[in-house]
Image: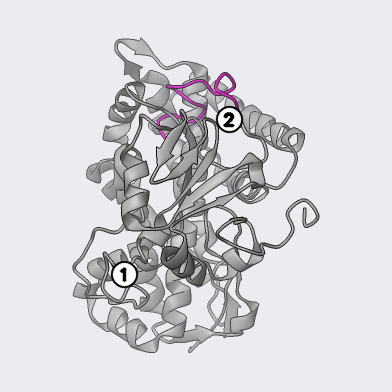
Amino acid sequence: MADRHPPVQDWASDFDHTDPAWSADPYPIWDDLRQRCPVAHTERYGGAWLPVTYDLIREVAYDTEHFTSRTVVVSDRRPGPDALPAPIGISPPITSDPPFHKLARRMLLPAFGRRSVAALEPFTRQLCRALLDQTTGNVAFDAAAEYAQHIPVRVIVRFLGFPESDAGIFRRFIHQVMEEVNTTAEERQTMMAELDDYIDAQIDDHIASPRDDLTSFLLSAEIDGAGLSREHVRGTMILLMIAGIDTTWSAIGASLWHLARYPGDRHRLATEPALMDTGVEELLRAYAPVTMARLVAKDHDFHGHQLQEGDWLLLPFPAANRDRSVFEDPGRVNLGRADFRHAAFGMGIHRCLGAHLATMELRVALEEWLARYPDFELADPAAVTWSSGQVRGPRSLPVKVQL
Protein backbone atom coordinates (compact mmCIF):
# COMPACT_ATOMS: atom_id res chain seq x y z
CA MET A 1 0.00 0.00 0.00
CA ALA A 2 2.79 2.42 0.89
CA ASP A 3 4.36 2.05 -2.57
CA ARG A 4 1.06 2.73 -4.31
CA HIS A 5 0.35 5.80 -2.18
CA PRO A 6 3.60 7.59 -1.31
CA PRO A 7 3.62 10.36 1.33
CA VAL A 8 2.02 13.66 0.37
CA GLN A 9 4.47 16.41 -0.53
CA ASP A 10 2.04 19.27 -1.22
CA TRP A 11 -1.52 19.09 0.11
CA ALA A 12 -2.77 21.67 -2.40
CA SER A 13 -1.80 19.63 -5.45
CA ASP A 14 -1.34 16.08 -4.20
CA PHE A 15 -3.61 15.47 -1.18
CA ASP A 16 -4.43 12.00 0.11
CA HIS A 17 -7.00 11.50 2.87
CA THR A 18 -5.35 8.18 3.79
CA ASP A 19 -1.95 9.76 4.43
CA PRO A 20 -0.69 9.22 8.02
CA ALA A 21 -0.35 12.99 8.53
CA TRP A 22 -4.06 13.47 7.75
CA SER A 23 -5.03 10.59 10.04
CA ALA A 24 -2.91 11.89 12.92
CA ASP A 25 -3.99 15.55 12.77
CA PRO A 26 -5.84 16.96 9.73
CA TYR A 27 -6.71 20.35 11.24
CA PRO A 28 -3.44 22.16 10.38
CA ILE A 29 -3.72 20.80 6.85
CA TRP A 30 -7.18 22.31 6.41
CA ASP A 31 -6.18 25.60 8.06
CA ASP A 32 -3.26 25.95 5.65
CA LEU A 33 -5.38 25.12 2.60
CA ARG A 34 -8.05 27.68 3.54
CA GLN A 35 -5.39 30.36 3.38
CA ARG A 36 -3.73 29.42 0.10
CA CYS A 37 -5.92 26.97 -1.83
CA PRO A 38 -9.50 26.48 -0.62
CA VAL A 39 -10.08 23.89 -3.37
CA ALA A 40 -7.22 21.40 -3.47
CA HIS A 41 -6.66 18.81 -6.19
CA THR A 42 -4.90 15.48 -6.54
CA GLU A 43 -4.27 13.03 -9.35
CA ARG A 44 -4.56 10.15 -6.91
CA TYR A 45 -7.60 7.88 -7.12
CA GLY A 46 -7.99 8.93 -10.74
CA GLY A 47 -8.42 12.61 -9.87
CA ALA A 48 -10.12 14.24 -6.88
CA TRP A 49 -10.99 17.67 -5.48
CA LEU A 50 -11.12 18.93 -1.89
CA PRO A 51 -12.95 22.14 -0.85
CA VAL A 52 -12.12 23.10 2.74
CA THR A 53 -14.30 26.11 3.62
CA TYR A 54 -17.75 25.93 5.17
CA ASP A 55 -19.40 27.78 2.28
CA LEU A 56 -17.78 25.71 -0.48
CA ILE A 57 -18.57 22.42 1.24
CA ARG A 58 -22.14 23.53 1.79
CA GLU A 59 -22.47 24.58 -1.86
CA VAL A 60 -21.46 21.14 -3.09
CA ALA A 61 -23.65 19.36 -0.54
CA TYR A 62 -26.73 21.17 -1.82
CA ASP A 63 -25.85 20.93 -5.54
CA THR A 64 -27.40 17.72 -6.85
CA GLU A 65 -27.20 18.87 -10.47
CA HIS A 66 -23.42 18.92 -10.80
CA PHE A 67 -22.56 16.32 -8.14
CA THR A 68 -23.96 12.82 -7.86
CA SER A 69 -24.04 10.67 -4.73
CA ARG A 70 -23.88 7.46 -6.78
CA THR A 71 -20.95 6.41 -4.61
CA VAL A 72 -19.66 8.09 -1.46
CA VAL A 73 -16.39 6.29 -0.61
CA VAL A 74 -13.28 7.27 -2.57
CA SER A 75 -11.09 4.39 -3.69
CA ASP A 76 -9.05 3.32 -6.69
CA ARG A 77 -12.14 1.47 -7.88
CA ARG A 78 -13.82 4.40 -9.57
CA PRO A 79 -17.22 3.43 -10.97
CA GLY A 80 -18.46 4.67 -14.29
CA PRO A 81 -22.00 5.94 -14.79
CA ASP A 82 -23.29 2.49 -15.75
CA ALA A 83 -21.66 0.59 -12.88
CA LEU A 84 -23.70 2.24 -10.12
CA PRO A 85 -26.62 3.80 -11.95
CA ALA A 86 -28.41 6.77 -10.46
CA PRO A 87 -30.82 7.54 -9.01
CA ILE A 88 -30.94 4.52 -6.64
CA GLY A 89 -27.24 3.76 -6.13
CA ILE A 90 -25.74 0.88 -4.21
CA SER A 91 -26.79 1.95 -0.67
CA PRO A 92 -29.98 4.01 -0.79
CA PRO A 93 -30.75 6.65 0.25
CA ILE A 94 -27.19 7.92 0.80
CA THR A 95 -26.18 6.87 -2.73
CA SER A 96 -29.47 7.99 -4.29
CA ASP A 97 -29.99 11.12 -6.34
CA PRO A 98 -33.24 13.08 -6.74
CA PRO A 99 -36.03 12.41 -7.25
CA PHE A 100 -35.69 8.83 -5.95
CA HIS A 101 -33.70 9.97 -2.91
CA LYS A 102 -36.69 11.77 -1.39
CA LEU A 103 -38.88 8.67 -1.67
CA ALA A 104 -36.26 6.36 -0.19
CA ARG A 105 -35.49 8.71 2.69
CA ARG A 106 -39.15 9.37 3.51
CA MET A 107 -39.79 5.65 3.71
CA LEU A 108 -37.14 5.34 6.45
CA LEU A 109 -38.16 8.32 8.57
CA PRO A 110 -40.47 6.44 10.98
CA ALA A 111 -37.71 3.98 11.84
CA PHE A 112 -35.33 6.79 12.85
CA GLY A 113 -37.76 9.12 14.62
CA ARG A 114 -37.33 10.27 18.20
CA ARG A 115 -39.75 7.64 19.48
CA SER A 116 -37.80 4.79 17.88
CA VAL A 117 -34.53 6.17 19.20
CA ALA A 118 -35.96 6.61 22.70
CA ALA A 119 -36.95 2.94 22.68
CA LEU A 120 -33.27 2.01 22.16
CA GLU A 121 -31.94 4.21 24.97
CA PRO A 122 -32.51 1.77 27.88
CA PHE A 123 -30.65 -0.96 25.98
CA THR A 124 -27.84 1.47 25.16
CA ARG A 125 -27.50 2.55 28.78
CA GLN A 126 -27.52 -1.02 30.04
CA LEU A 127 -24.89 -1.93 27.45
CA CYS A 128 -22.61 0.94 28.49
CA ARG A 129 -22.85 -0.07 32.13
CA ALA A 130 -22.08 -3.71 31.27
CA LEU A 131 -19.02 -2.68 29.27
CA LEU A 132 -17.81 -0.50 32.13
CA ASP A 133 -18.37 -3.37 34.55
CA GLN A 134 -15.85 -5.36 32.55
CA THR A 135 -13.21 -2.69 33.25
CA THR A 136 -13.81 -2.67 37.01
CA GLY A 137 -10.57 -2.90 38.92
CA ASN A 138 -8.41 -2.00 35.93
CA VAL A 139 -6.41 1.17 36.43
CA ALA A 140 -5.50 1.29 32.74
CA PHE A 141 -7.29 0.00 29.65
CA ASP A 142 -8.13 0.91 26.05
CA ALA A 143 -11.24 3.11 26.07
CA ALA A 144 -11.67 2.73 22.30
CA ALA A 145 -11.26 -1.02 21.96
CA GLU A 146 -12.97 -1.94 25.24
CA TYR A 147 -15.76 0.64 25.31
CA ALA A 148 -16.44 3.03 22.42
CA GLN A 149 -16.16 0.49 19.60
CA HIS A 150 -18.66 -1.91 21.16
CA ILE A 151 -21.55 0.49 21.72
CA PRO A 152 -22.80 1.36 18.19
CA VAL A 153 -22.00 -2.16 16.94
CA ARG A 154 -24.28 -3.75 19.49
CA VAL A 155 -26.97 -1.08 19.06
CA ILE A 156 -27.09 -1.48 15.26
CA VAL A 157 -27.00 -5.28 15.51
CA ARG A 158 -30.04 -5.08 17.78
CA PHE A 159 -31.72 -2.48 15.55
CA LEU A 160 -31.31 -4.68 12.46
CA GLY A 161 -32.26 -7.87 14.31
CA PHE A 162 -28.97 -9.67 13.59
CA PRO A 163 -27.32 -12.17 15.96
CA GLU A 164 -25.46 -10.30 18.71
CA SER A 165 -22.61 -12.78 18.27
CA ASP A 166 -21.97 -11.22 14.83
CA ALA A 167 -20.71 -7.93 16.28
CA GLY A 168 -17.12 -8.93 15.51
CA ILE A 169 -18.02 -9.62 11.90
CA PHE A 170 -19.43 -6.08 11.66
CA ARG A 171 -16.18 -4.58 12.91
CA ARG A 172 -14.18 -6.50 10.31
CA PHE A 173 -16.45 -5.41 7.46
CA ILE A 174 -16.25 -1.78 8.57
CA HIS A 175 -12.47 -1.84 8.64
CA GLN A 176 -12.35 -3.36 5.16
CA VAL A 177 -14.85 -1.00 3.54
CA MET A 178 -13.86 2.28 5.19
CA GLU A 179 -10.13 1.98 5.82
CA GLU A 180 -8.72 -0.44 3.27
CA VAL A 181 -9.39 1.88 0.34
CA ASN A 182 -5.86 1.41 -0.98
CA THR A 183 -6.57 -2.20 -1.91
CA THR A 184 -6.97 -3.17 -5.55
CA ALA A 185 -10.32 -3.11 -7.32
CA GLU A 186 -10.35 -6.92 -7.33
CA GLU A 187 -9.72 -7.09 -3.58
CA ARG A 188 -12.50 -4.60 -2.85
CA GLN A 189 -14.86 -6.52 -5.12
CA THR A 190 -14.13 -9.71 -3.16
CA MET A 191 -14.74 -8.08 0.21
CA MET A 192 -17.98 -6.47 -0.99
CA ALA A 193 -19.18 -9.82 -2.34
CA GLU A 194 -18.58 -11.37 1.09
CA LEU A 195 -20.56 -8.57 2.72
CA ASP A 196 -23.40 -9.04 0.22
CA ASP A 197 -23.51 -12.76 0.99
CA TYR A 198 -23.72 -12.08 4.71
CA ILE A 199 -26.57 -9.59 4.30
CA ASP A 200 -28.43 -11.92 1.90
CA ALA A 201 -28.34 -14.67 4.54
CA GLN A 202 -29.89 -12.28 7.08
CA ILE A 203 -32.57 -11.24 4.59
CA ASP A 204 -33.48 -14.87 3.90
CA ASP A 205 -33.69 -15.55 7.64
CA HIS A 206 -36.05 -12.60 8.14
CA ILE A 207 -38.22 -13.61 5.20
CA ALA A 208 -38.62 -17.04 6.80
CA SER A 209 -39.11 -15.60 10.31
CA PRO A 210 -40.37 -11.98 10.34
CA ARG A 211 -39.84 -10.07 13.57
CA ASP A 212 -40.04 -6.58 15.03
CA ASP A 213 -36.80 -5.05 13.80
CA LEU A 214 -35.50 -2.82 11.03
CA THR A 215 -34.78 -5.67 8.62
CA SER A 216 -38.39 -6.85 8.70
CA PHE A 217 -39.47 -3.20 8.44
CA LEU A 218 -37.51 -2.88 5.18
CA LEU A 219 -38.85 -6.15 3.82
CA SER A 220 -42.42 -4.97 4.35
CA ALA A 221 -41.86 -1.36 3.25
CA GLU A 222 -43.21 0.09 0.02
CA ILE A 223 -42.39 3.00 -2.25
CA ASP A 224 -45.20 4.16 -4.51
CA GLY A 225 -47.14 0.99 -3.69
CA ALA A 226 -44.33 -1.41 -4.60
CA GLY A 227 -42.12 -3.40 -2.27
CA LEU A 228 -38.39 -2.78 -2.16
CA SER A 229 -36.10 -4.86 -4.34
CA ARG A 230 -33.64 -7.18 -2.62
CA GLU A 231 -30.85 -4.92 -3.87
CA HIS A 232 -32.50 -1.91 -2.22
CA VAL A 233 -32.99 -3.75 1.08
CA ARG A 234 -29.44 -5.09 1.06
CA GLY A 235 -27.95 -1.71 0.19
CA THR A 236 -29.84 0.11 2.95
CA MET A 237 -28.79 -2.50 5.50
CA ILE A 238 -25.15 -2.15 4.44
CA LEU A 239 -25.50 1.62 4.76
CA LEU A 240 -26.80 1.29 8.32
CA MET A 241 -24.07 -1.18 9.20
CA ILE A 242 -21.28 1.03 7.89
CA ALA A 243 -22.58 4.56 8.46
CA GLY A 244 -24.25 3.81 11.77
CA ILE A 245 -21.28 2.20 13.48
CA ASP A 246 -17.87 3.54 12.50
CA THR A 247 -19.05 7.15 12.63
CA THR A 248 -20.57 6.84 16.10
CA TRP A 249 -17.77 4.90 17.77
CA SER A 250 -15.35 7.45 16.32
CA ALA A 251 -17.36 10.31 17.86
CA ILE A 252 -17.48 8.55 21.24
CA GLY A 253 -13.76 7.80 21.17
CA ALA A 254 -12.78 11.32 20.10
CA SER A 255 -14.93 12.82 22.85
CA LEU A 256 -13.27 10.62 25.48
CA TRP A 257 -9.87 11.56 24.02
CA HIS A 258 -10.73 15.24 24.47
CA LEU A 259 -12.03 14.80 28.01
CA ALA A 260 -8.93 12.82 28.98
CA ARG A 261 -6.79 15.79 27.90
CA TYR A 262 -8.87 18.65 29.32
CA PRO A 263 -9.75 18.16 33.00
CA GLY A 264 -11.75 21.40 33.13
CA ASP A 265 -14.17 20.21 30.45
CA ARG A 266 -14.26 16.76 32.04
CA HIS A 267 -15.16 18.17 35.43
CA ARG A 268 -17.88 20.41 33.99
CA LEU A 269 -19.58 17.60 32.10
CA ALA A 270 -19.33 15.29 35.12
CA THR A 271 -20.82 17.80 37.57
CA GLU A 272 -23.20 19.90 35.43
CA PRO A 273 -25.81 17.58 33.88
CA ALA A 274 -27.59 20.53 32.25
CA LEU A 275 -24.47 21.09 30.15
CA MET A 276 -24.53 17.65 28.53
CA ASP A 277 -26.77 18.46 25.55
CA THR A 278 -24.80 21.49 24.37
CA GLY A 279 -21.57 19.72 25.30
CA VAL A 280 -22.41 16.81 23.04
CA GLU A 281 -23.19 19.15 20.15
CA GLU A 282 -19.90 20.97 20.66
CA LEU A 283 -17.87 17.77 20.78
CA LEU A 284 -19.59 16.69 17.57
CA ARG A 285 -18.63 20.00 15.98
CA ALA A 286 -15.03 19.89 17.14
CA TYR A 287 -14.39 16.22 16.34
CA ALA A 288 -16.85 15.46 13.55
CA PRO A 289 -15.69 12.12 12.17
CA VAL A 290 -17.12 11.98 8.65
CA THR A 291 -15.76 13.09 5.29
CA MET A 292 -18.21 12.20 2.53
CA ALA A 293 -17.60 11.97 -1.22
CA ARG A 294 -19.37 12.86 -4.44
CA LEU A 295 -18.70 12.22 -8.12
CA VAL A 296 -18.80 15.10 -10.57
CA ALA A 297 -21.95 14.45 -12.60
CA LYS A 298 -20.95 16.62 -15.55
CA ASP A 299 -18.16 19.03 -16.47
CA HIS A 300 -18.43 22.00 -14.16
CA ASP A 301 -16.58 25.27 -13.54
CA PHE A 302 -16.37 25.38 -9.74
CA HIS A 303 -15.02 28.79 -8.73
CA GLY A 304 -12.44 28.72 -11.50
CA HIS A 305 -11.58 25.04 -11.13
CA GLN A 306 -12.44 22.87 -14.14
CA LEU A 307 -14.07 19.75 -12.71
CA GLN A 308 -14.44 16.88 -15.15
CA GLU A 309 -17.29 14.37 -15.23
CA GLY A 310 -16.34 11.37 -13.12
CA ASP A 311 -13.85 13.22 -10.88
CA TRP A 312 -14.05 12.49 -7.18
CA LEU A 313 -14.84 15.32 -4.77
CA LEU A 314 -14.37 14.96 -1.01
CA LEU A 315 -16.62 16.84 1.41
CA PRO A 316 -14.64 17.16 4.66
CA PHE A 317 -17.45 18.14 7.03
CA PRO A 318 -14.96 18.32 9.92
CA ALA A 319 -13.10 21.04 8.00
CA ALA A 320 -16.33 23.03 7.64
CA ASN A 321 -16.69 22.90 11.43
CA ARG A 322 -13.23 24.44 11.91
CA ASP A 323 -13.79 27.42 9.58
CA ARG A 324 -13.19 30.57 11.64
CA SER A 325 -15.30 32.65 9.26
CA VAL A 326 -18.32 30.75 10.64
CA PHE A 327 -17.33 29.65 14.16
CA GLU A 328 -15.58 31.87 16.69
CA ASP A 329 -12.31 30.33 17.88
CA PRO A 330 -13.18 27.03 16.16
CA GLY A 331 -10.14 25.14 17.45
CA ARG A 332 -11.29 25.56 21.06
CA VAL A 333 -13.98 23.35 22.56
CA ASN A 334 -16.60 25.53 24.25
CA LEU A 335 -19.11 23.23 25.95
CA GLY A 336 -21.61 26.07 26.26
CA ARG A 337 -21.41 27.11 22.59
CA ALA A 338 -24.92 27.87 21.33
CA ASP A 339 -24.12 27.83 17.60
CA PHE A 340 -25.43 24.51 16.30
CA ARG A 341 -24.74 25.10 12.59
CA HIS A 342 -22.09 22.39 12.65
CA ALA A 343 -21.90 19.88 9.82
CA ALA A 344 -21.05 16.79 11.88
CA PHE A 345 -24.06 15.04 10.32
CA GLY A 346 -23.52 16.50 6.89
CA MET A 347 -25.48 19.12 4.98
CA GLY A 348 -28.02 19.11 2.21
CA ILE A 349 -30.44 16.35 1.26
CA HIS A 350 -28.11 13.66 2.60
CA ARG A 351 -27.86 15.02 6.14
CA CYS A 352 -27.54 11.93 8.34
CA LEU A 353 -30.86 10.18 8.83
CA GLY A 354 -29.52 8.61 12.02
CA ALA A 355 -28.50 11.87 13.71
CA HIS A 356 -30.90 11.37 16.63
CA LEU A 357 -29.63 7.82 17.16
CA ALA A 358 -25.96 8.79 17.04
CA THR A 359 -26.49 11.75 19.37
CA MET A 360 -28.32 9.55 21.87
CA GLU A 361 -25.52 6.96 21.81
CA LEU A 362 -22.84 9.61 22.33
CA ARG A 363 -24.76 11.28 25.16
CA VAL A 364 -25.48 8.02 26.98
CA ALA A 365 -21.91 6.78 26.48
CA LEU A 366 -20.50 9.95 28.05
CA GLU A 367 -23.06 10.05 30.87
CA GLU A 368 -22.32 6.49 31.91
CA TRP A 369 -18.56 6.84 31.52
CA LEU A 370 -18.40 10.03 33.62
CA ALA A 371 -20.69 8.52 36.27
CA ARG A 372 -18.22 5.65 36.61
CA TYR A 373 -14.93 7.44 35.87
CA PRO A 374 -15.18 11.20 36.48
CA ASP A 375 -11.38 11.37 36.71
CA PHE A 376 -9.24 9.86 33.97
CA GLU A 377 -6.38 10.77 31.66
CA LEU A 378 -4.41 9.39 28.74
CA ALA A 379 -2.11 6.61 29.85
CA ASP A 380 0.28 7.31 26.97
CA PRO A 381 -0.60 10.12 24.55
CA ALA A 382 1.88 8.75 21.99
CA ALA A 383 0.08 5.39 21.97
CA VAL A 384 -3.21 6.86 20.70
CA THR A 385 -3.83 5.83 17.10
CA TRP A 386 -6.42 7.17 14.65
CA SER A 387 -8.24 5.51 11.78
CA SER A 388 -7.43 6.44 8.21
CA GLY A 389 -9.83 7.18 5.40
CA GLN A 390 -13.11 9.07 5.40
CA VAL A 391 -14.11 8.36 9.00
CA ARG A 392 -11.63 9.54 11.63
CA GLY A 393 -11.64 8.44 15.24
CA PRO A 394 -9.36 6.81 17.81
CA ARG A 395 -8.64 3.15 17.16
CA SER A 396 -6.47 2.84 20.25
CA LEU A 397 -7.11 5.03 23.29
CA PRO A 398 -5.16 3.90 26.37
CA VAL A 399 -6.46 5.65 29.51
CA LYS A 400 -5.74 5.61 33.21
CA VAL A 401 -8.72 5.94 35.56
CA GLN A 402 -8.89 6.90 39.20
CA LEU A 403 -10.51 4.10 41.17
Q: Secondary structure at mark 2?
A: helix
Q: Is residue 356 above or below residue 150?
A: above
Q: Tell me which amino acid carries mark 2.
A: Ile
Q: Residue 179 appears at what percent x and percent y? A: 63, 51
Residue 199 image label: 2
User: Magenta: predominant secondary structure element?
Assistant: loop
Q: Which residue is mark 1?
A: 324
Can you tell which quarter of the image residue 337 is in?
bottom left
Q: Residue 146 appears at what percent x and percent y? A: 57, 67
Residue 147 image label: none
Can you tell which quarter of the image residue 352 is in?
top left
Residue 399 relative to residue 190: left or right? left
Can the viewer see residue 353 in this picture?
A: no
Q: Give the residues in magenta.
A: 79-94
Q: Tell me the residue at 52%/34% (across/down).
A: 308
Q: CA distance from mark 2 to mark 1?
A: 43 Å
Q: Are marks 2 and 1 in contact (CB under 8 Å)?
A: no
What colour scheme does the image use? one colour
Q: Tell me the residue at 48%/75% (across/down).
A: 257
Q: Is residue 390 above or below residue 251?
A: above
Asked whether 89 falls inside the magenta stretch, the response is yes
Q: Residue furthest right?
A: 3
Residue 63 relative to residue 242: left or right? left
Foreground residue, 328 or 66? Answer: 66
Q: Residue 372 appears at what percent x and percent y? A: 41, 78
Mark nearer the N terminus (2 vs 1):
2
Q: Is residue 24 above or below residue 202?
A: below
Q: Tell me the residue at 23%/68% (across/down).
A: 278
Q: Residues within 10 Å of mark 2 (few under 14, many from 20)?
A: some
Q: Residue 13 appears at what percent x and percent y? A: 59, 56
Q: Tell me which amino acid carries mark 1.
A: Arg
Can the viewer see residue 37 in this picture?
A: yes
